[in-house]
C-alpha cells in the first residue's frame, strides 16, 4: 500500500485521488498512519463482505435475549 504524508495529500489531492482509484493509500501525519483513502468500488466491495459475515437474525436474538445462553 502506498503512503503519502498529510502535507503531500493536501497539496496533491488530485494525485491522491488518482492513486486511491488504483489501490488504497495510507495518509500519515507526523510519520504515523492516520487514514486510508480508497476508491468507492473498493469501499462497496468491503462493505458487501462485511454484510455477508453478519448472520441474519443475530441482532433480533440479542435484543430478545434468545440464543441459548
Image (cartoon, rainbow, N blue to C red):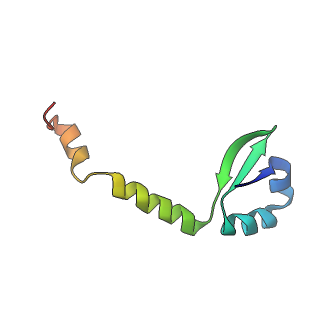
Taking depth in this image into account, of 63 and 15 the one nearest to the observer is: 15
Residue 29 in the image: state x and y as whole percent: 78, 41
Q: Quadrant of residue 15?
A: bottom right
Residue at (84% x, 61% y) in the render: 12
| On-image quarter of the N terminus | bottom right
- From this view, report whether residue 66 is shown above or below residue 39: above
Residue at (79% x, 67% y) in the render: 14
Q: What is the residue that sits farthest to the top in this orientation? A: 69
Residue at (27% x, 51% y) in the render: 55
Residue 32 in the image: state x and y as whole percent: 75, 38
**Left or right of 30 on screen, residue 50:** left
- From this view, report whether residue 42 is shown above or below residue 56: below
Q: Quadrant of residue 38?
A: bottom right
Q: What is the residue that sits farthest to the front in this orientation? A: 1
| On-image quarter of the C terminus | top left
Residue 58 in the image: state x and y as whole percent: 24, 46
Residue 25 in the image: state x and y as whole percent: 70, 56
**Left or right of 41 on screen, residue 58:** left
Residue at (21% x, 50% y) in the render: 57
Q: Quadrant of residue 8?
A: bottom right
Amino acid at each position: 500500500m502506498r503512503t503519502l504524508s498529510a502535507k503531500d495529500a493536501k497539496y496533491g489531492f488530485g494525485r491522491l485521488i488518482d492513486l486511491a482509484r488504483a489501490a488504497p493509500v495510507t495518509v500519515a501525519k507526523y510519520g504515523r498512519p492516520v487514514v486510508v483513502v480508497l476508491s468507492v468500488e473498493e469501499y462497496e466491495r468491503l462493505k458487501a463482505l462485511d454484510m455477508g459475515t453478519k448472520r441474519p437474525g443475530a441482532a433480533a436474538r440479542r435484543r430478545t435475549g434468545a440464543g441459548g445462553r
